[in-house]
Structures are given as structure tokens and as C-alpha cells.
Image (spheres, helix red, strand yellow):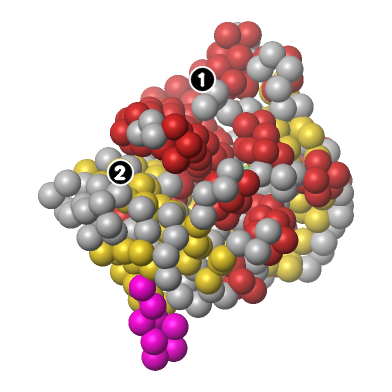
Amino acid sequence: MQTRVCIIGGGPSGLMLSQLLHLQGIDTVVLERQSREYVLSRIRAGVLEHGFAQLMREARCGERMDREGEIHEGFQIAHDGKMDRVDLHKYSGGSSVVVYGQTELTRDLYEARDLMKGVVIHNADDVQLRDIKSVKPYVTYRAGDEIVRIDCDFIIGADGFHGVSRNSIPKTVLKEYEKVYPFGWLGVLSRTKPVSPELIYAKHERGFALCSLRSQVLSRYYIQVPLSDKVEEWSDEAFWNELKRRLPPDVSEQLITGPSIEKSIAPLRSFVAEPMRYGQLFLAGDAAHIVPPTGARGLNSAASDIYYLYHAMVAHYKNGDSSGLDSYSAKALARVWKAQRFSWWMTTLLHTFPDSIEYDRQLQQTELAYLFSSDAAQRSLAENYVGLPF
Ligand code: PHB
């Protein structure tokens, strides 16, 4: 098989890039290790920054997102017995975010790929990247007993944190930065009316909690838990009780509970791998960087990678200009590190750290008091939350 760009990973990043390149007449093949059903059963975050929503529209996949997604112009932070609102619209110069589940967005991207007869190969086992330093790289995978070879000009590693792409870069070249937080988030999805029309981030001494949503009939809630907790040990009842204890009393009273449709624990981690290019291989999204979910940056920091790669590939194929490809790693990493900084800041601000000292807790309180007394601080939060420019 032959293609111009071989994309490893059929998640939102890989599908989005494939769709954008196809619209420009650039041929791609997407390889995904899992089945489509599996990819579409994963529950992921649900806040899209302005720039990501624009990219969905540019990829001609934004119709359902614009119809069913909710525009949010602010969110709440509950702390020290009160609730303060962050006015995203006011402090970001009129911008906002779209609440639309990543799972739904992935479904839309698959549909768009199908309509354009894009090649997306599922259940591709044992993917291997070959000759990535040469100008004629290729990828092999196993389909049943058969080994299939795909010759290409470029390989995009959009196969997530555990994918093969990053590990195809020699250890002597790759530099990895990692910070593991001493807690995780226990998340519950329930078919209940959300407790609040806007997201509530709650700082509480028992641990952080978040009230989020997918629609007016589907709620997503999280609580901070120790890493040693097992999801089987958390009954629905125990989850709802703990969530209520961490929310302001007037919010808890309004909370409608119900059976969980999905329940899982995710550890919190910050991670960056440099460089994001090695030979003809370009890393994108979780394959190169991970953030804790607190600032809702995960998918959004993948969006800028895709944006830069898309424009660099188009300039290369249409004008013979490879400068965008050459500057990709440095440019992508500059924005990636800003998303890292913001996610670390929000995580540190709102969680209860098991090893914190009284001094740290005073600083957390002071940071929040400063935030809500300063227009400049709220502007800084808002511009990061709606997404820094690409
Ligand atoms: C979610 O809805 O899953 C969600 C929302 C905001 C976050 C993290 C997760 O910061």
C-alpha cells in the first residue's frame, strides 16, 4: 500500500488531521489498533476550546457540535464556603468554550471520514515504524496472519501515551519530562439533569470535586481519590455521598443522583516528550504530551499540534515549502508547555495534596483570594481556559 501521510492512531487527533489533509487533496491512511466500537466506548473529557471548535468546522465536521454542543461563557469555583464565577466571555474578550463530549466528536469525525471514503484501518496489530530517518519511511502492521506494508512520505504518531510512535525515537534523542500527582479522579457518568448549568470546580479539604455535563440530561461528576483506591470499592451511593460532602450545601441539596452509566479512576499526570519530530516522524497529541484534566487542556493541546501539522503539510505539498515541517517541534512545544503550566497551576490550586504543609494551604487560599480580587488574574485564567492562540 502507498500513501503520502500514514497516521498512527484513530482518535480525534489522527482523524482530524486525516480529514483536513483529505480536503486539501493530500492522501492519508489511518491505522488504529482497536476496533471502532472500542474507540467510541471510551468516555473522555467534554470541554472544547474555541480554536478546536473552529478546526472541527474547517474539517466540515462541526454541524452536530454546533447544534448539540453548549456554549459556556463562564464556570464556577467553589472554595472556602462560597462560589465565585469566572466570566470567560468578559475576561477573554468575548470568547467561550463548547461543552461537547470527545466521544461524540470522534463519532462525527469517523462519519466524515466514511463519507469521503477515507481509509481508516482498525484492529491493526503490531504496528512498526521503519526507516523513519530516511526519506522513504514505511509502516508495517499485522492483519490476521498477513503483514501489510504502507510506504509513505511522512508518519504521524497520534497513537496516545502508550502508543508505539514515541518509542520509535531512540532513547538517546528523546527527552521526557514527567510529573505524577499523588491522586486520581474517580469519574461517574449518569443520566441525570446536571446540578448546575455551568461547570463547578470545587476545592474542599476532603479533596477536589468537579460537576460537569455532556447535555441537559447527561451529567459527568468527578472526585479526587487516593491512587490506592479501586473503582470496584466505590458504590454509586458512596460516590454521591462523598461528592455531596465536597460541594457547597445549597448545591448538594439540588444534586440529582442516579445509577452510574460509567465509573472509572484516572491517575493525574503531566508529561512532555521532546523533540516532537524525528526524521519523517511527527508526534501529535497524547503521544507527546499529557496534562492532568483540571484545566480541560487534553484534547485542546492536541488541537494546536494538528493545526501546525496541517498547515505545514499543505505548504510542503502545494508550495514545496518545508519550513513549517522544520519548525514544527519547536512551535508545537512552545504552546504545549503553556498548556502544561496552566494545567499544573489549576491542579495545584484546587486539589488537596497529602504531603502539603500549612504554608502551602495558606498560599492556595491566598491565590484564590487574589484571583477573585484581580481583573488581571481573572483575565489570565480566562485566556488560558478558552485557549491561547495557535
Ligand atoms: C469533563 O466534562 O469530563 C471535564 C470537564 C472539565 C474538566 C475536566 C473534565 O476540567
| Furthest-front residue in this view | 319
Assess whether residue 337 is covered by the magenta stretch: no
Residue 43 pos. (x, y %): 63, 61
> Of label 2 and label 1, which has the lower sequence position?
2
Q: What's the CA distance linking mark 2 and mark 1?
A: 37 Å
Q: Is mark 1 within 8 Å of ligand 1?
A: no
**Secondary structure of the residue carrying numbered label 2:** strand
**Residue 330 falls left or right of residue 295:** left
Residue 304 pos. (x, y %): 50, 35
Can I make out residue 202 in this image?
no
Magenta residues span: 142-149
Nearer-the-camera pick, 293 or 221: 293
| Furthest-bottom residue in this view | 145
Label number found at residue 277: 2
Identify which amino acid the numbered label 1 is placed on. Glu
Identify which amino acid the numbered label 2 is placed on. Arg
